[in-house]
Image (cartoon, helix red, strand yellow):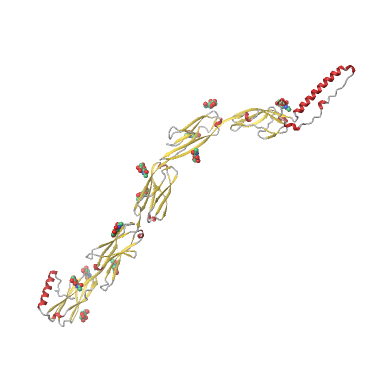
Amino acid sequence: MATMVLSRPLSGTCQTLLLFLLLVCCVLSPVSQGQQFLLRVQPQDPVLPAGGSLVVNCSTECPNPKLIILETSLLKKPVGVGPGWAAFQLINVTSDSRVLCAGFCNGFQMISSSNITVYRFPDQVELAPLPPWQPVGKNLTLRCQVAGGVPRSELTVVFLRGEEELSRQRVAGEPAQVEVEVTATVLVSRSDHGASFSCHTELDLRPQGLGLFENTSAPHQLRTFALPRTLPHLVAPRSLEVGTSRQVTCTLDGLFPSSEAQVQLALGDQMLNPAVTRHGDRLMARTTVTARADQEGPQEIVCNVTLGGETRESRENLTVFSFLGPILNLSESSAPEGSIVTVTCMAGARVNVLLDGVSAAAPGQPAQLQLNATEVDDQRSFFCSAILEVDGEIFKRNTSVQLRVLYGPKIDRANCPERLKWKEKTKQVLQCQARGNPAPQLHCLQKDSNLEVPIGIPVFVKLRYNGTYHCQAASSRGTYTLVVVMDVQGRNHPFVTIFMAVLVIVGLVTVTVALKYLYGAKRRGIYKVNQESSSLPLTSMRPMEAVAEEPSAAG
Ligand SMILES: *[C@@H]1O[C@H](CO)[C@@H](O)[C@H](O)[C@H]1NC(C)=O
Ligand SMILES: *[C@@H]1O[C@H](CO)[C@@H](O)[C@H](O)[C@H]1NC(C)=O
Ligand SMILES: *[C@@H]1O[C@H](CO)[C@@H](O)[C@H](O)[C@H]1NC(C)=O
Ligand SMILES: *[C@@H]1O[C@H](CO)[C@@H](O)[C@H](O)[C@H]1NC(C)=O
Ligand SMILES: *[C@@H]1O[C@H](CO)[C@@H](O)[C@H](O)[C@H]1NC(C)=O
Ligand SMILES: *[C@@H]1O[C@H](CO)[C@@H](O)[C@H](O)[C@H]1NC(C)=O
Ligand SMILES: *[C@@H]1O[C@H](CO)[C@@H](O)[C@H](O)[C@H]1NC(C)=O
Ligand SMILES: *[C@@H]1O[C@H](CO)[C@@H](O)[C@H](O)[C@H]1NC(C)=O
Ligand SMILES: *[C@@H]1O[C@H](CO)[C@@H](O)[C@H](O)[C@H]1NC(C)=O
Ligand SMILES: *[C@@H]1O[C@H](CO)[C@@H](O)[C@H](O)[C@H]1NC(C)=O
Ligand SMILES: *[C@@H]1O[C@H](CO)[C@@H](O)[C@H](O)[C@H]1NC(C)=O
């Protein structure tokens, strides 16, 4: 609808005043001919891109119009005039403006206007960079920066997660040249990890018959994380011996995404290289730590887990110690009998030693004992234990050493009989043992003949074994001799001998009686006496052999 105003845009007060005057004029004067005709502006309220050009046609039905002009602040150029119309080209239209067509019909002024709307796409649509890591459960503010873009009334900013629309907002604020920031908040969850966020603008000129124009920002990927307040669970020994290895583990639950979590383990300044395993939200670092000699003393084991730029750290105290010994020493490992042997046991500093029940005077001091080596000390073991306490932990170590005592040789009577009674042609064993270190050689030789009877093995007894023996034990430490008398008896039974002796006596008595008789009968002649009795055939009495021999008979 065309309104009757002056060809120049005037201030609001003036316009109102003018309208009032016109209204008064209309009321006062009757409707005239010229007022029946209207001036038309074509196109009405056009929308065109910024910098574009446009032909504006002012036309009227008035049969005799005069002075049809176009009032505008824009550059204009007449492009045609006809009966009842005049056309003008507007070039380089860069901003919204209002044009007025004015003319006269029968002395009456006709005025019509048209509002030109310029549209321009945004010069810039950008999503502000996201934080490198966003904690889960916290609000994230998305910022979309828009520069340019008119008309603002038709411009909307839309925030997107992937394809999903998160929020939609009008862009407020003029002038269009200024950059504006539109924000939206999202509560971040684990599922947002790796999601792509973007914003886009919509310039909706569909009501103007043009269409929907979209400009989209570059997408940004979000990385989210969850790191609990709790500290890593660090399991480490309280003490560690130099050169030994112990296991250390460090665990933390509730991590998301655990694959992105970094874990570091260190003993003092020694970085450890743990094997890291991840199961769901759990991260576990495991390694064996070996203490170096230069780390002796109080140390700290540190485990820290870093995720999303945040770190959780646990520390444990650990004492690195060295435990030397025990070293058990004999002044002589092979001591001659009767010599003094010193046994020493010692260990490192702060270590308590206990040598065969004898405790050292103070920790770190050696324990000692002395003895006059005797035969019974040969192969005696000395036992030394070392005890070290580190931070309430007890460490024990022991060692033993064996003493050799050089003695002998000796033969005990108990192991070697003084007198043996053996029967000829039987099997017997000569039992005789010698002692000594080094072990002596033992030989039993017959006194005169040097006949040797083997020891410890069965021998077939011969009559010539009868005699006195010198059993001699010999080692590098000397000799020792013991006499053994061996009585070997022949096969004849003693009863037979007695019987024969009785026969001899009987024979002698018989002879004596016979001689007396012969003396008395000499005058009557000489008698010959037959002495058969001594050569009587004897039978052996085998069954009787088992009967114990009488010592007197053996002589
Ligand atoms: C202007 O409008 C009139 C009447 O509608 C028409 O006859 C004429 O051709 C138009 N001129 C141009 C340049 O479009
Ligand atoms: C259009 O107008 C703008 C200022 O409004 C000016 O900077 C620009 O140079 C003009 N363009 C042309 C093609 O005349
Ligand atoms: C044209 O703009 C003026 C203010 O600039 C406004 O009063 C008028 O209603 C507008 N006309 C149309 C048809 O939109
Ligand atoms: C996140 O923002 C919403 C409003 O945008 C608010 O209601 C909510 O409490 C906020 N949550 C947190 C955790 O800040
Ligand atoms: C905005 O989108 C339009 C089409 O929708 C395109 O012609 C223009 O180049 C885009 N502007 C920017 C800054 O990307
Ligand atoms: C984690 O621990 C290691 C070893 O102590 C250390 O070097 C590193 O600086 C720590 N990291 C952080 C973030 O504290
Ligand atoms: C480690 O030792 C220091 C003193 O040496 C002590 O202050 C600290 O509390 C100890 N830390 C732990 C975890 O026991
Ligand atoms: C132990 O004995 C060896 C020789 O047998 C000697 O060199 C060493 O010094 C001794 N050590 C002690 C602690 O007596
Ligand atoms: C060791 O003991 C023996 C016998 O008891 C003695 O004869 C010897 O003199 C002792 N040795 C020393 C060094 O005292
Ligand atoms: C001595 O140490 C060994 C291992 O080194 C151990 O098997 C043994 O039981 C220990 N003996 C004693 C009496 O402590
Ligand atoms: C055996 O020897 C002893 C003396 O050593 C001797 O008296 C005895 O007659 C001998 N016996 C035999 C049967 O030779």
Residue 206 is left or right of residue 516, and the answer is left
- Toward which corner of the image does residue 258 lie, by quadrant? bottom left
Residue 446: percent from the left, percent from the top? 68, 29
Q: Nearest the camera: 247 or 543?
A: 543
Looking at the rendered image, the quarter that the N terminus falls into is: bottom left
Residue 346: percent from the left, percent from the top? 46, 35
Instruction: Answer above or below: position of 417 versus 325.
Output: above
Residue 81: percent from the left, percent from the top? 18, 80
Q: Nearest the camera: 441 or 531?
A: 531
Residue 436 is left or right of residue 359, and the answer is right
Instruction: Answer above or below: position of 410 versus 521.
Output: below
Task: Tell me if residue 67 can be seen.
Answer: yes
Q: Nearest the camera: 548 or 431?
A: 548
Residue 348: percent from the left, percent from the top? 44, 37
Looking at the rendered image, the quarter that the C terminus falls into is: top right
Q: Residue at x 23, y 70 (%)?
A: 118
Instruction: Answer above or below: position of 130 versus 466.
Output: below
Residue 113 is left or right of residue 361, and the answer is left
Residue 283 is left or right of residue 380, and the answer is left
